Amino acid sequence: MSEIDRYLHGEMHDAERSKFEENFVGDESLFYDIVQSENELVDTYARGEMSESERQRFERSLDSHPARKEKLANAKVILEFTASERSEHKTITIAERSAFFSKLGELLSFRSPAFQFASIAAILLLAFAAIFLLLENQNLKSAHTELAVARVREAELAAEIENAQEVSGDLTSELNTERLRIAELESEIAKLRSSVPENSTVTVSPSTIATLVLTPVMSRGGVPPPAKRLELEGEVTRVSIVINLPAETGDTVSVRLNGEAVANDVRVRTRQTEKTISVIIPITRIKDQRNTIEITEGAGKPKVEYAFSVVKK
Amino acid sequence: MSTLTASSFQFLLDRLDAEPEIAAEKYEELRIRIAHLLRWRGCAESHAEDLADRSLDRVAAKLAAGEDIENLNAFAAAVARFIWLEHSRKDRTDAVGDDLPEIAVQPDLSFLDDPDMRLGCLRRCVVAKFNDEEKRLVVGYYDTDADEKSKSARKRLAESFGVTLNALKVRACRLRMRLESCINDCVAGVTHSSCQGTQKQEVM
């Protein structure tokens, strides 16, 4: 049994009690331990939780501690009050839970400020997204336009390359034709030599005529077409020029050398698909360096132009 | 009868603490302990506060008279015991004479039979004298059942208030003293008015 318990029940001797009182008046912790012990004592009694012996002992203390009777009366109402506060708190808690679902419902209702705020936020978000997509679409259209322009440019360049290849092919074809003609001429010379008896004496005078084969060439971008080069020996007095004509050329044509007419109504020869004419021009009418031959049909504009250069040795 | 004068009261305050505010707090705390000493000696609730005041007045007078008091708390306790003896003896003399054995003075507790009135006083006191935090502390501290349960509940309560269990105990005890004092004053006021046949009035 503790000192506090014995003191509260008036079970201390006088000297011990006096000493104990002097102690708790100067000792806060001890004093409030006694106060708390007395509170618990009356609370336990008020709740009816004491054993029979404890109850009798407590009731005896009431006779010598009249203030404790009033304290007991207070303890009863304090217990009642705290119990009611506890149940009220629980009721409030249940009410708060109910209010939670109610608030949740209100939050999701169309009229709630929260829902309206969320709606406005969603609308703004969608508006920003729409603007972003519009700008992206415009960028895409611009890229498509650039792509189309690039494709057109690509087609133009491809056409230019094709034309250049055609020109190159024409030149190659002209070279081959020349080689073929040379071979034919050499074959003719060989035949002629074989037809002459070996013991016959043939005086071969130096050649006074030179042969030139001209093929139409295309002029590009105002640049003069390349001129054929002809080297003449001193004995040459005439130049035989074979001119290959375009396929659409008519039956007769006129020929002008350096702007002067040298042959009119020359009959066009057709061999297979090729059309040619031959003219013989005195060397005196041929200029050194570059010469131009124009082929016309009737009184029209020059149909085809040819160029060649001459170097006299 | 009070023997307190302004100068002697100042002697007591100066002895309790050099700082006036702290001295006043210590004075009030000493008064509470002396009043409880008297109750635990058998003094009725209705006289405990008055006798405590008389005890401290006498201590102050002794200090003012130049008495050498080594332990003020022990001296105050001794004076309170003497005051209580004086009071008990006077009551016996006033009643039936000097020959009766010493018994505690018991007040008329008939009004205690009306718990509804006391509960009403308690509710009014809580509303009038307690803020929300104090009410939460009182309800939380005293709404306990078994020992173990109360220990853990009070520990949680102390944590929620950010104080130690001992500090919580002191605060709870002081609040309960304030509450009980208010209830007692309220009940006494209502009862006094009823006895005089006048309309009930509340005393806070």
Image (tube, rainbow, N blue to C red):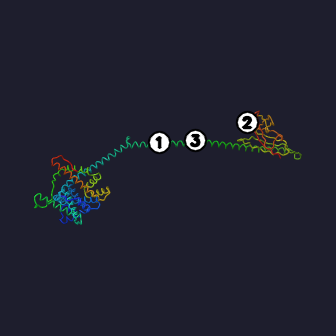
Question: SS for tag 3?
Answer: helix
Q: Nearer the viewer, residue A98 or A79?
A: A79
Q: Are marks 2 and 3 on the same chain?
A: yes
Q: Which residue is mark 1?
A: A127
Q: Is residue B129 above or below residue A251?
A: below
Query: Which amino acid, by three-letter code, is at mark 1?
Result: Ala
Q: Amino acid at mark 2?
A: Glu
Q: Residues within 10 Å of mark 2 (few under 14, many from 20)?
A: few
- Mark 2 lies on a secondary structure that is loop
Up/down of B186 relative to B15, above or below: above
Q: Earlier in the sequence, mark 1 or mark 2?
A: 1
Q: Is residue B6 left or right of residue A121?
A: left
Q: Residue A312, can we see it?
A: yes
Label 3 to label 1: alpha-carbon separation: 27 Å
Circle 2 residue: A248
Badge 3 or badge 1: first in the primary sequence = 1
Query: Picture coordinates of residue A280 (x, y %)?
Result: 82, 39
From the image, tell me which residue sits under label 3: A145
First reached walking from the N terminus: tag 2 or tag 3: 3
- Residue appearing at x 71%, y 43% in the figure: A167
Q: Are callouts 3 and 1 both on one chain?
A: yes
Give the image quarter of residue A172: top right
Percent position (x, y) of residue B50? 19, 57
Q: Nearer the viewer, mark 3 or mark 1?
A: 1
Q: Position of residue A193 (x, y in %)?
A: 84, 45
